[in-house]
Amino acid sequence: MAGTGRNFAIAAAMLLVTVGAVLVLPSAGWACAVAAALAVAGVVAFRGNAWRSASLLVAAVALSLALLDAFAGLLTPTAHGQGLVRFTDPKWWPPPHPVLGFGPAPGSRVEAVATFDGKPVFRQTYTFDKDGGRLSKPGPPGSDFYLFVGDSFMFGQGLHDEETLAAQFARLTGNTVRVVNFGVPGNAPNHVVRAFEAGLLDRYVGEPVKAVIIWVIPAQLARTTGDGEWLASSPRYELRDGTLVHTGSFESYRWSHPLEGLKYWLGHYFAFIDAIGQQQRQQLQADLFVAMMAKLKDYAQEKFKAPLVVLYSWPDEKTLKAYGAGAGVGNTGQEMLVQTMARVRKLGVEMLRVDDLTDGRPTKDILIPHDGHPTAFQNGLVAEELKKRLRPN
């Protein structure tokens, strides 16, 4: 009995050290390596063959997980912007939203700062109007109305309020139109579909809305299935017999489907688990994305009798022809990205290829250094092209 008590005490101490390693060390792989080392020590420290055999088994499993994670990490591309640090005041921003999961508070201001290796990248103040949209100069009452939606590209992350795409578009018209910028960092098409579906944009029904404009990027594909910790409370959709169906939030779905939730949680800690079924997941993401674009086209027509305009910073057939099959792959296959954009084009929406406006220009002119978001200059190029298409006179 004394030996059993001693074994339990040693096991408890090892468990506490392992938990500490998970909290302190930079990856689950390192934590598994610590657990493996402790388990090997347990083979010597424990009394009784059963305890020693169990400790040896734990060591083997932990070491296997550490090696698998290390191997998967070698195959995973280095994330863009490593060394970039962003923070905001208020700290927890955007705040929770009862329908969309998160979103700017109406009438608020946010101080945003980014540094790279300790050096400043940008320091901006984001200002929001009474509806929670990024502030732009108001146009004349009753004038034509343009609704800008999307993620941080449309929002204008790292830019002054007057440098966003929506604000520059309005300025090019001599501020003779009204614009609202509902871009939100981290958003996915899920959020825009849900905003329409839940009636959050009905306040503009009856207004002379001339276009609903969305800016899409490949990173939004993964967001359609909630692949991001910040998306837990965001709206989740699935396809049922080709129909897009809202099922609640990603968080509620994972609690009601424990195996799915466990795989998602483990995938955050182990790259090799996240890679399981990746091809099927990417195909699902593409299908969801296209279905969401189709739904947005329908909503824009039904509610406002306006076209959906899709701006895209995304590999397509031109990219493939110019740079070859290896261009712009990221974490999603090049062929699938190209096919996805071709499917969106077949929906009959108005499309604007942003690369047509930026090809050949120095990267520092079109992307915020180390951050990767569009500069005010790039937004100006897109705004000029939008004006030519939407307000030619």
Image (tube, grey):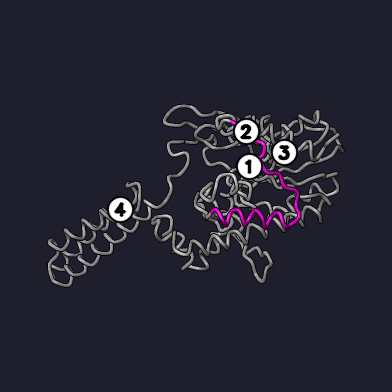
Q: Where is residue 145 in the image (x, y as percent from the top left)?
A: 81, 41
Identify the mark nearer the N-term, 4 or 1: 4
Q: Give yes or no for contact between labels 2 and 1 (Cβ–Cβ under 8 Å).
A: yes
SS at circle 4: helix
SS at circle 3: loop
Q: Give yes or no for contact between labels 3 and 4 (Cβ–Cβ under 8 Å).
A: no
Per the image, the residue denoted by label 4 is 31
Q: How far apart are marks 2 and 4 (CA)?
A: 39 Å
Q: Where is residue 354 in the image (x, y as percent from the top left)?
A: 66, 41
Q: Residues within 10 Å of mark 3 (few under 14, many from 20)?
A: few
Q: Distance between the residues labelled 3 and 4?
A: 47 Å
Per the image, the residue denoted by label 2 is 126
Viewer-proximal residue among 265 and 368? 368
The circle on residue 104 is: 1
Q: Is residue 119 visible?
A: yes
Q: How far apart are marks 4 and 1 (CA)?
A: 37 Å
Q: Give yes or no for contact between labels 2 and 3 (Cβ–Cβ under 8 Å).
A: no
Magenta region, residue range:
334-361
The amino acid beneath tag 4 is Ala
SS at circle 2: strand
Report if residue 360 lies within the magenta region: yes
Viewer-proximal residue among 274 and 323? 323
Q: Can residue 198 be seen in this view?
A: no
Per the image, the residue denoted by label 3 is 130
The amino acid beneath tag 1 is Pro
Comparing labels 2 and 3, the label whose residue is closer to the camera: 2
